[in-house]
Amino acid sequence: MTKILILGGGFGGVRAALDLEKKLGDRGDVEITLVDKNDSQTFFPSLYEVASIYGIDHQHPFHTKLRGTVSIPFSDIFKNKKINLIQAEINHLDIQNKHVVTSNGATLDFDYLVLALGSVVSTFGVPGADEYAFKFKTIEDGLMLNDKIEELYIEASEKKRPLPINILIGGAGFNGVELAAELSNCTVHIACSHKITQQNCSAIALVEAGPAILPMISGKERDLIQKRLEKLGINLLVNSPIQEIGPDFIKLKNGNYLKGDLIIWSGGVKALDIFRTVDSLELDDRGRIFVNEFLQTKNYPNIFAVGDNIVFIDPKTQKPIPQMAFLAIEQGRVTAENIARIINGSSELKKHKPAYDVWIIPVGGKNAVVHLGKFTFSGFFGYLLREFVDLRYFLTILPFFKALKIFFRGVTVFSKND
Ligand SMILES: Cc1cc2nc3c(=O)[nH]c(=O)nc-3n(C[C@H](O)[C@H](O)[C@H](O)COP(=O)(O)OP(=O)(O)OC[C@H]3O[C@@H](n4cnc5c(N)ncnc54)[C@H](O)[C@@H]3O)c2cc1C
C-alpha cells in the first residue's frame, strides 16, 4: 500500500487531498490521509467580518452561527471521498523513519508527505507584543477582539472610559488594512447600541514600520486605498517601527508614545516551530521550508510542502512569493499532480508557476478594491466581485447545496456589517 499523508486541512492541504483523490482514489493500492487539529477549515478571508460583527449575543458561549460562516466542516468537504480524515495535532516529524507523531502518541507512516500546516503569528520579539496585543489569526482571536470592543463601549457608556476609544493596529499589510477599515464601521454601530451619541467614538491608527502601507502593491492602488482609509478617519502612521507594547500604549522607536485602549498586532506570521526540530529541512528566518520548482523539499523528493509554511522563490523576481490563499490552493493542485505522476511512474514533474498579480482588499462595509492583473475595480462592484470569488471557492470544495448554504449564511449574518 502506498501511503500519502497530508498534514493540515487549510487551503493548500484540502486542495491537494481532493485532487489526489480524483487522480488516485480508484486505485486500491493507494491510501490518502489528511490530518488536522481542527474539525473544519477556517475561511480566513472572512475573519475580519467576525471581529467586526455587531448586534450579536455576547453571552453566547460558542457563537455557533457566527463560527459557521468561517469554518467549513471537513465532514462536508470529504463526504463520500476516499480520504481518511484524522483529527489530531501533529507534534513530531520523523522524516528519516517516514512517520509523524500526533499529540496523543499515535504514529502515522507515510511514503509521500505533504506539509500544509499554515502559519502562526510572529511578534518578531517586540517586547510586550505577546502579552498585551490582541492577535488576529484564528476564529477565537476574531471573537475575542469583538468581545473586547463590546466591553470597551460598555465601559464608555458607563462613563468609566473616555471617548474616543483608541484602537492601535500594528502592521499595515492586507490584514491590518482590512481590519482597520472594518472596525471604523463597526465601532459606530456598537457605540450606538450602547446609546453613545458622540460622533467620533473611535480613533483608529494603523502603525507601519515601513515607508508605506501595503508595501506589496503598486502606488496607484495604494493611493486609492489610502484615500478610502483617510475618508474613514483612520490615522496612517508610516516609518513608525514599534519598540515596545504595554498594556495601554505603543512606544515607537522614534520615542513617541501612542495611547491605546485596544492594541492589535497584525505584524506578520512565521511557520510552526515543529520544522526547526528537523535538521535536514532547509528553513528561512521565519522557519518556512525552502522548496524547489516542483514543490519538493530540498533533500526529500517524496516530501512536498505548500502554502504559508513554504518559501518559494519566484524565478522571475528572485524574491519569495506572498502568502495567499489562492497560491496555497494552486500549490496543492501542483503537488497532487506531481505525487500522482510519480506514483504512476512518470519522471517528468509539473513546475509551480505562481501568478499573483491579483488581490482583493475589503475596505469597510460593502466596499472592496479588487486588482486583477491590468484591471482594478473598487467600491460596491469590488465587493460583489469579492462575494463571487468566495462563492466560487466554496463550489470548488463542497457539494453544490452545501456551498450555497455556507455562502448565504455568511451573506445573511454579515449583511448588517455595512
Ligand atoms: C485574517 C486573515 C485574512 C486573510 N485574507 C486573505 C484573503 O483575503 N485572500 C488571500 O488570498 N489570503 C488571505 N489570507 C492568507 C491565507 O489565509 C493564507 O495564505 C492561507 O490560509 C494559507 O493556506 P495554508 O493551507 O498554507 O494554511 P492554512 O489555511 O492556515 O491551514 C493550515 C491548517 O493546518 C492546521 N494545523 C496547524 N498546525 C497543526 C498541527 N500542529 N497539527 C495538525 N494540524 C495543524 C490548521 O488547523 C489549518 O487547518 C488571510 C489570512 C488571515 C490570517
Image (cartoon, helix red, strand yellow):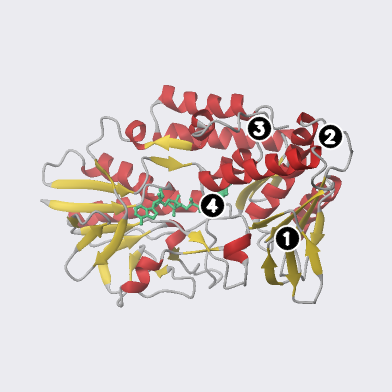
* 283 relative to 144, above or below: below
Comes first in the chain, label 3 or label 2:
2
Q: Residues within 10 Å of mark 4 (few under 14, many from 20)?
A: some
CA–CA distance in space, label 1 to label 3:
38 Å
Is residue 230 among what the camera can see?
yes
User: Which residue is outermost to the top?
Assistant: 401
For the residue with label 4, is its CB less than 8 Å from the closest atom of ligand 1? Answer: yes
**Percent position (x, y) of residue 263?**
69, 57
Comes first in the chain, label 1 or label 4:
4
**Percent position (x, y) of residue 26?**
17, 38
Please give the label number shown on residue 196.
Answer: 2
**Amino acid type for the residue under numbered disc 4:** Lys
**Amino acid type for the residue under numbered disc 3:** Leu
CA–CA distance in space, label 1 to label 2:
22 Å
For the residue with label 3, is its CB less than 8 Å from the closest atom of ligand 1? Answer: no
User: Which element type, helix, strand or loop, lies under badge 3?
Assistant: helix
Instruction: Pick the residue in front: 26 or 77.
Output: 77
**Percent position (x, y) of residue 109?**
17, 57
For the residue with label 2, is its CB less than 8 Å from the closest atom of ligand 1? Answer: no
Residue drawn at (43%, 47%) of the image = 11
